[in-house]
Amino acid sequence: MSAENLIARLDKVRKTGADKWQARCPAHEDKGPSLAIREMDDGRVLLHCFAGCGAGEVLRAVGMEFADLYPRTGSFHLQPVKRPFSAYDALLCLAYESLILLQFANHLATGATLTEDGRNRLRLSATRLNAAHGVTQ
């Protein structure tokens, strides 16, 4: 399948780059385009609703299934392609994890304690930032 099949079923579609589009999400009352669509080199189609709708909800709203997001040949399983993140995406992730750490630091600075979930999220942020640091070495 190509992204064209999905795009033909959406409203207010606009191209945002090579093999990338934005459109109104059909799974919720969308006033502006919150659905991102991207067709990968191997034919897979990725979609993400920034308002929080799941891919299944989006597909049901346009009468499609998850299988429709993948090429019919299944060749995407045969030759995985390693693609690095764009610098922009990497910086966004680093900024987000840094903000999480900053919030926890401010919380702890007031003498408050962390819940188990908070400690787990703090460890996850630290792990992600350490992993990013390892990539730059």
Image (cartoon, grey):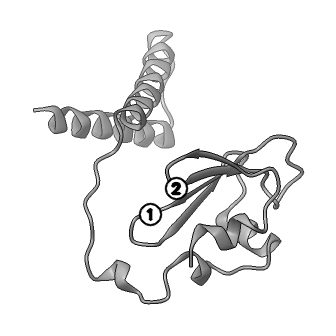
Residue 117: % across, % down? 50, 43
Location of residue 113 with respect to 75 vertically, above or below: above
- Label 2 sits on what residue type? Asp
Q: Position of residue 83 (x, y in %)?
A: 29, 54
Instruction: Between residue 124 and residue 74, name the one nearer to us.
Output: 74
**Distance in Å between CA atoms under marks 2 and 1:** 7 Å
Q: Secondary structure at mark 1?
A: loop
Kind of residue indicated by mark 1 = Met
Q: Which residue is mark 1?
A: 40
Residues at discs 2 and 1 in contact (Cβ within 8 Å): yes
Q: Which of the 4 quarters of the picture holds residue 28?
A: bottom right
Q: Of discs 2 and 1, which sits in the foreground?
A: 2
Tell me where residue 105 sits by quadrant. Answer: top left
What residue is rendered at 41% in x and 43% in y? 120
Q: Residues within 10 Å of mark 1 (few under 14, many from 20)?
A: some
Q: Position of residue 110 (x, y in %)?
A: 50, 10
Q: Is residue 4 above or below residue 112?
A: below
Q: Which disc, if any, is residue 19? A: 2
**Which of disc 1 and disc 2 is earlier in sequence?**
2
